[in-house]
Image (spheres, grey):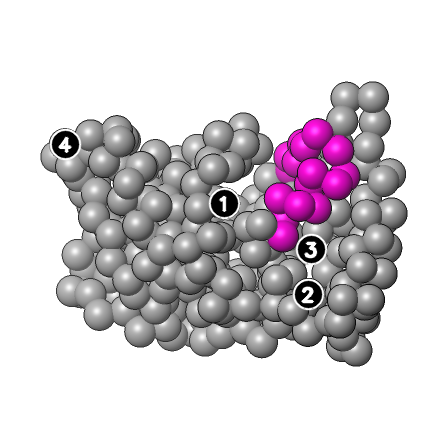
Amino acid sequence: MTHQPSESDSTAWQSPHIAAAWQRQAAMREDIMGQTTRRMLEAADIKPGSRVLDIAAGSGEQSLAAARIAGTNGFVLATDISESMLNAAAESAKQEGMTNISTQVMDAEQMDLESESFDAVICQHGLMFVARLDLALSGIYKALRKGGRFAAVVWSSPEQNLAFSVPMSILLRTVGRSSTLLESAGIFSLGRPKKLIPLFQTAGFQEVQVQPIPRVYRALNAKTFLEERIAMGSGGMVNLLNQLSEKQRKAALDEILESLKPFEGPNGFAAPCESLLVYGNK
């Protein structure tokens, strides 16, 4: 949710409608992503009193989770390029009565933060959308104190996330673009450990580790899943759909819906998916 590459819709993330959709579905994401978030916070070694920076915080569920651990003597700064998303995060913090969390509109590629001012940095499903990841990682490294830790979650490979990659492949083909873009830019661009580890090491991080986190994405049915993805601006879908004529759009959505049917069963829609947890020390 910071700076999107070419096939992602950078303006979509800044839409109040998409921010509202993310906020509405917070409980659903907690059910799906809760364990992943907890593992990321543990990997970041967040403790009571920690000062935490959240990159591409979005609607801020993981920011609030970090703030609960950091406690009243700690602090969380949630940053994102989307003011609408951060407004949703701030509203959630207000509803919980949290006073140890602040939000700031900030591009991950152009962070203006004091050196060594944070004990931990986190980023959940945001690094994939940063065009100049080298600049972002350099800024994160600078903001961390010596001995601090950066932990991030990114999407794994397309083949481990078929309910997400197949629809994107269909849309890319429909607009006349190669499905190889799935791995060269956007949602799956960091889905290989052999790519992730050198990026972190080049930025200066030490003892870099990558761990897969499998989970299951559940919905009422395939149609509901697809509608949720579109409402939330998932993975650049909005941008690609907006490039289609009404006839093309209907045909593409029908094909996507058919591709998702194998994930339907007696208990509803259940699609295996996987993220990668990557972390390293300064």
Residue 195's place in the image compared with 34, above or below, is below
Is the residue under label 2 in contact with that under label 4 (CB below 8 Å)?
A: no
Q: Residue at x 31, y 74 (%)?
A: 110
- In primary-sequence order, the first of circles 4 and 2 is 4
Depth check: give the residue in front, 219 or 137. Answer: 219
**Residue 155, x across and y down, in percent:** 60, 52
Which of label 4 and label 2 is nearer to you? Answer: 2
Res. 40 visible in picture: no
Q: Residue at x 27, y 44 (%)?
A: 90
Alpha-carbon neighbours of circle 2 within 10 Å: few (<14), some, or many (≥20)? Answer: many
Provide the residue designation for mark 4: 72
Q: Amino acid at mark 1?
A: Ala
Would residue 228 be found to the left or right of residue 78 on screen?
right
- In primary-sequence order, the first of circles 4 and 3 is 4
Q: Tell me the distance, in whole angstroms, between the alpha carbons under discs 3 and 2.
A: 23 Å
Q: Secondary structure under badge 4?
A: loop
Residue 4's place in the image compared with 276, above or below, is below
Res. 18 visible in picture: yes
Q: Amino acid at mark 4?
A: Thr
Provide the residue designation for mark 1: 21
**Residue 141, x across and y down, in percent:** 31, 63
